[in-house]
Image (tube, rainbow, N blue to C red):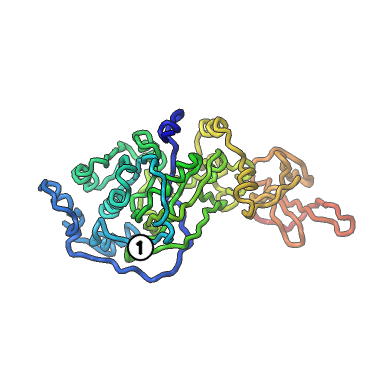
Amino acid sequence: MKFRKYLRGRGRVLAFVFIASVIWLLFDIAALRISIINDGNQDLKERENDNVKDVLKHPLQKVNIDKKEFLKNRFFNVFLSEQIPIDRAIPDTRPQICSENLVHDDLPSTSVIFCFVDEVWSTLLRSVHSVLNRSPPHLLKEIILVDDCSTKDYLKEQLDVYMSQFPKVRIIRLKERQGLIRARIEGADAATGEVLTFLDSHVECNVGWLEPLLERVYLDRKKVVCPVIEVISDKDMSYMLVDNFQRGVFRWPLVFGWSIWMCGGEIEIIPCSRVGHIFRGDNPYKFPKDRVKTVERNLARVAEVWLDDYKELFYGHGYHHLLDKSVTDIGNLTEQIELRKNLKCKSFKWYLKNVYPDLDTPPSQHFSYTWLRILRQNTSCLAPQEKQIIMEQCDNTKPHLRWMHKSGKALVSTAQNLISRDSKTDKLINKWCECWDRKY
């Protein structure tokens, strides 16, 4: 049965290859020698078209380059990247057995999608060339470059002219800044391959990177596959291998794609597939609005849709301020919540129990002291009322519901109520105190 026929119905299977989200455990190895040439285009094939010849020269080579400024603004060594061939050789870092493996001869084709905004010319071209040079032509349906409204002149007509020499490469330009996810959706909508592969725009695909990914999806369409992500040094552009054993993990500040597991898929890292990535010390991209607020708002939206009763653990990791709706409006989530229901996704509790049981998670209790310092039982929370204690509807945004844990196993509220345990009767005691004289 052909793969395309197998995928008919709601559409193609999505094999998401996320490159920039996770930094892996690295091995300290010697830096690899980099072959530097005076003319960055020396190894490129001669072009008959004079216009293309001119475009092959990096536009930044035509101006005076401030090395420190480029390192500061882009957070990696742009000047050195400009001197390295765009189709340089890199070491084959796969385990030896990988080159001896046989793969199916009926693998599906893929559309490789790069989303970028104001990317450095040399790293963008090196990313594209690594896919073209190291992907079997019959498996590479196309390369789609999604320009998320870049402002750099060299990424406009000059990029169009350069990429016109590659029939499998096409460019989609967004008129307004959409962000990574919407840009990927635009690329996915335009793709014609049977599998979608998403890559960052500052990577280098290694030898034999594609076949193992496609084979895993071919054998099980529920798999969402990812290569071993290796490191391209942001200082000297050397290519460094990482440990063969890797595990993608979840952290409460929301790292990694647990929702794939909840909705019937499985994430796998494929040891025989290797892709190098430039990990920068900071994010060089500009946001239409405040960068921190944009990221935090997106995280809060994810928590509200996917974490269920565990979302307060996320807010407890330094995101209390996002609970104040007058300050942070996370928008309407009805469509996202309905999508989760329609896909019949499992609960986050299921994920913790079945996929990541060794995650450090506070135990479930009938009456719990939460990360937000709230004493909670189901939907009711302990609240001070003058010199009494009552139960009222939980609301994470109300400061008076928060209790500070004091030494001696006591809890103190902002209303000066103190709850402690009587050592003789082992019962809880509520009394008025003067031990809390500042707002919490």
- Quadrant of the rendered image containing residue 433: bottom right
Q: Nearer the viewer, residue 68 or 228?
A: 228
**Residue at the bottom extreme?**
30
Q: Residue at x 60, y 38 (%)?
A: 346
The residue that mark 1 highlights is: 239
Q: Is 80 left or right of 199, judged from the image as shown?
A: left
Q: Is residue 392 above or below residue 313?
A: above
Q: How many marks?
A: 1
Q: Is residue 326 above or below residue 369?
A: above
**Residue at the right extreme?**
424
For mark 1, does the 10 Å Cα neighbourhood hold few (<14), some (14 to 19), or many (20 or more) residues? many
> Can you see residue 197?
yes
> Can you see residue 146?
no
**Residue at the top extreme?**
9
Q: Amino acid at mark 1?
A: Tyr
Measured as percent of width and height from the top left, residue 61 is found at 18, 58
The quarter in which the N terminus is drawn is top left
Q: Is 418 left or right of 85, judged from the image as shown?
A: right
Q: Nearer the viewer, residue 340 or 74?
A: 340
Measured as percent of width and height from the top left, residue 168 is found at 26, 41
Helix, strand or loop at label 1? It is strand
Q: Residue at x 64, y 49 (%)?
A: 372
Q: Is residue 236 above or below residue 322?
A: below
Measured as percent of width and height from the top left, residue 111 is found at 35, 40
Measured as percent of width and height from the top left, residue 30 is found at 38, 71
Q: Nearer the viewer, residue 322 or 371?
A: 371
Q: Residue at x 35, y 55 (%)?
A: 207
Q: Residue at x 55, y 47 (%)?
A: 321
